[in-house]
Image: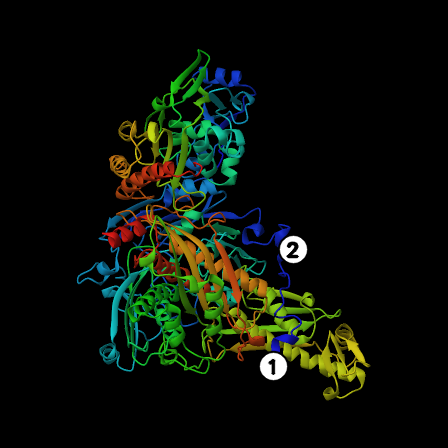
Amino acid sequence: MSNPTANFKQVNHSVTKVDARQLALGKPSYVDDFRPPNALVVKMLWSPHAHARIVSMDVSEAEKMPGVKAVLWHGNVPRIPHATAGQGFPEPSPYDTFMFDTKVRFVGDRVAAVAAETEEQALAALECIKVEYEKLQPVFTIDEAMAEGAPIIHDEPDAYVPIPIPYEPQKNLVARVGAEVGDFEKGMKEADFTFDDTYETPYAQHCPIEPYVSLAQLDSAGRIVITTSTQVPFHCRRIVAQILDVPVQKIRVIKPRIGGGFGSKQEVLLEDVVAMFALRTGRPCIWRFTREENFRTGRTRHPIRVRIRLGAKKDGTITAIGMDCWNNTGAYGGHGLTVVSCCGSKVLPLYRCENIHFLGKVYYTNLPCGGAYRGFGATQAFFAFESSMDKMAEALGMDPVRFRQMNHIRSGEGSPIFAALGEGKEGVPMTVGSNALAECIVRGAEEIGWSNRTDWREKTGRYRRGMGMACLMQGSSIPHIDMGGASIKINEDGSFNLLVGATDLGTGSDTVLAQIAAEELCTTTDKMIVYSSDTDMTPFDVGAYASSTTYLSGEAVRKAAADAKRQILHTGAEMLGLAEKDVLCKDAHVQTPDGKQKVSYGDIACYALYQKNQYQIIGTASHVTGKSPPPFAAHYTEIEVDTWTGNIKVLRYVSTIDCGTAINPALCEGQTEGGTLNGISYALTEEYLFNENGRMMNANFTDYHIFSMRDAPRIKAIIVPSYEDTGPFGAKSVSEICINGPAPAIANAIYNATGARLYEFPFTPEKVLNAIRAVQA
Amino acid sequence: MKITEKMKFEFPPTLAVALRMQANQKTRGKLLAGGTDLMVQWASGVTPPNRIISIWGLPELNLIEISRSEVLIGAGVTHARMARSPELKRHLPALTAAAATVGATQIQTRGTLGGNAANASPAGDTAPALLVTGGWAVLASLAGVREVPLTEFWTGYRQIAARPDEIILAFRLPKKNKARERFRKIGARQAQAISKVMCASRMLMDDGRIVSAAIAVGSVAPTPIRLSAVEEYLAGKKLTNPVIAKAEALARAVEPISDIRSTADYRRWATGRLVRDALEALKTKSRST
């Protein structure tokens, strides 16, 4: 096969981000930069209780406070069940949320909101709201939630789930999903070695630089214009229309530049309130979360208990894989089903096995709400699964790399799991196309020096080094569900307006999509004027999630560009007096193959706009994928454990990645390094600490520790190219997969250093020391 | 944190003016010597005082004087300046190592030795290193100057021996001379992490015996403390394995609390391990800290 990437002029090059200059210069770019001077400030009264009924409430005094323009509470807004999760419609999440309710279900749940002239006035008014609570017994763990006779968190009669999936709120059960392939029990019986281990993964917050922030105002026609920091502008419009009971037609959602999301902003948490205040007051209204609110009320990573049962024969054949997941979704069920489903669907296909059991259950608790977070269930499940793979390799007396090399999925192979597990319905059968995992494994092993790895029993002394690795996969978009649209039109100077629904939240997708359009159109990326995510102006797109933008929206852009290119060729040929078959596009010209006759895109645009047979050259296309091709990765790390204090130092980390064609290699490396550091921080330090009332005690950056640059180890990102035939110019996804590696790779390295196996993280000095002392005892 | 209209900031141009302000109850205010602790406290819900007197940058507090046997460090000297001073590193290596672990670059640039001491957090990074020097805090008021031994400086949880009319002028710290110093901190991450446990030590060896041992720990008691029982045990001992083990066990007699940063159990264990770490380091030829 010839290498198609060799001829690329725009894609597969690290062009500068299209928004780099404006951001570097500090030009108004983000939501709060567009706050009008007369904007009212919104503040929320949050529940101090984990589980309580609101017996009575009096907002009259607050309404009379200076500067207060409106107060919202359950007594004066519509009661419409909905899901805050920004997903396809109808959502695979329960409609268990109300703008305001008579019950509060976690510390940080909404009670009442105030819009006032200033923040101080809004805060002062909140203090005047009188609320009488009847405290209810809270549920803080999965075990408590599952217990017979447990308090029912969602006892309201009007909650329901809009698609046919199991939902039993009287048992605190949000969802259940399972898959059986072959005969799992038989596979376990055939095995020479079996393991049965249970792992726990913690809460975490995405900690984007920009917290949640939304601004709503009425335009001159009385429509509601919402400028918001969102990953899902179109879902946001639909959901706000639903909650406010107004037509979609009445709402416009604009996404400006975004200061990071990582999944947290795949949620509608503020927009309904600012929109309602704008309607009630006629004034622009802005609401920005504090960092504390971002932690308490913002979405988190679902903590999941994962039980792995693994059976293998002496020769290394895996005979059975069992995965049971118990997902704590917190007080509301958004993304509960889909996250637990991805525990299976994004992990189990990685290794060949004929007998697979998967069961995921999702439970409510009175703790903060889980949501979408980079990795989306795969992160939690890979920690468990790749830890068990290492245990099995040791039992087999096999190098962990060799064991994985023997069993990992190859190009041309499928997995019954692809067909069995989808998003609230069955999945899509699929065979893997591009797959450079084998090379990823080898390149990573070379880079880290895997051949120097020694057994933990040979190690002595206070500081012990260990190496660990993990293999990973993810998906690229949700097949037959996600849709992206794009349109592209030409201007007189040969520039193009590229309009996409796709949502750049700092990832660089505007740049990547411009590169794809430019490549298809045989022009340069700097000719693209990209405008994204404005529900009045751009085509629809589901938004930035499920590792979909490059693969899904990118293909929509490529098709739209191809559509425009056909028109350019047509008009160019007409201008040259030649047949379309005798001309081609090259370097922003339509020309004969020898280049002797040619006409520029600018001249073609002027001709079409002003001169003869006039029309607007405009291409438009939509794309739905039939596959979700997995990117693959092999992660390696070398760490040093201080066996006296339990402190872990990550010395080196190697992240190899097969993301198909890297449309923008610098951005792919950035995603890979960023996701890896994000994962290392999650593995080593990040956790939610609750007091006995379910209140998070470390809702700030002093006590919730994300890794800083001083902590960052040497991370080497290695892009191992492959070519995904179904993706734009061979691309598949890159953004999520890299966060899945650090927890299992570091866990395996801790074992290799000390013989201590950890079943839950973060791997704090306290936990590591206890595990080491247990080994030494 | 919001600066409200109620808060009044004073910037006295000289130490004399500052002392006069503090002498009178009506003009007295909360001293701000960098603000890297105070601002965080105010931001997290502690009501800020109405009157704040910034002594940051006062030239009288910014001296570093090195004499034959002692170092005098002004209370206004920043952590960054200490961490970068080769002379301080030679004479007080535990202190400069501690200064280099305070917060992050910005905090080290703004935060001061006097501010860190006056904040009196049990987790204050520089306190154990100050304690092991056996030095003094120099306090000034209109009534005069007096010196308080550092072992008597931290009197209780977030309490110090200075009177309301006094300002910490400087710290008078004996040089380590031939002794060896070491500072180790265990935190959740490299930068901007309040310690779980930390330990500073200054030990003088002669002919394989410990002549004198000063060991101080932080984050394991309401104040930074010296481990006197360990110190007394070690005096005159040879550094044998049983001696080290006994010292470690004695160090574990501390009575820390469990909080969001660590557990009592871990802190006890880690205190013992940090003492062992200091003693093991003495056995090697390698440089201290």
Report which quarter residue A1 is drawn in: bottom right
Q: Which of A5 and B228 lies nearest the eye of the viewer?
A: B228
Q: Is residue A156 above or below residue A64?
A: below
Q: Amino acid at mark 1?
A: Ser
- Residue A592 makes an appearance in the image: yes
Q: CA distance from mark 1 to mark 2?
A: 37 Å
Where does the image place residue A429, in percent across and percent down from the top left?
41, 82
Q: Is residue A503 above or below residue B41?
A: below
- Which residue appears farthest toward the left when viewing the image? A148
- Which residue appears farthest toward the top when viewing the image? B143
Q: Is residue A660 left or right of residue A263?
A: right
- Residue denoted by label 2: A21
SS at mark 2 in the image:
helix
- Residue denoted by label 1: A2
Closest to the camera, between mark 1 and mark 2, is 1
Q: Is residue A146 above or below residue B8?
A: below
CB under 8 Å between callouts 1 and 2?
no
Host chain of mark 2:
A
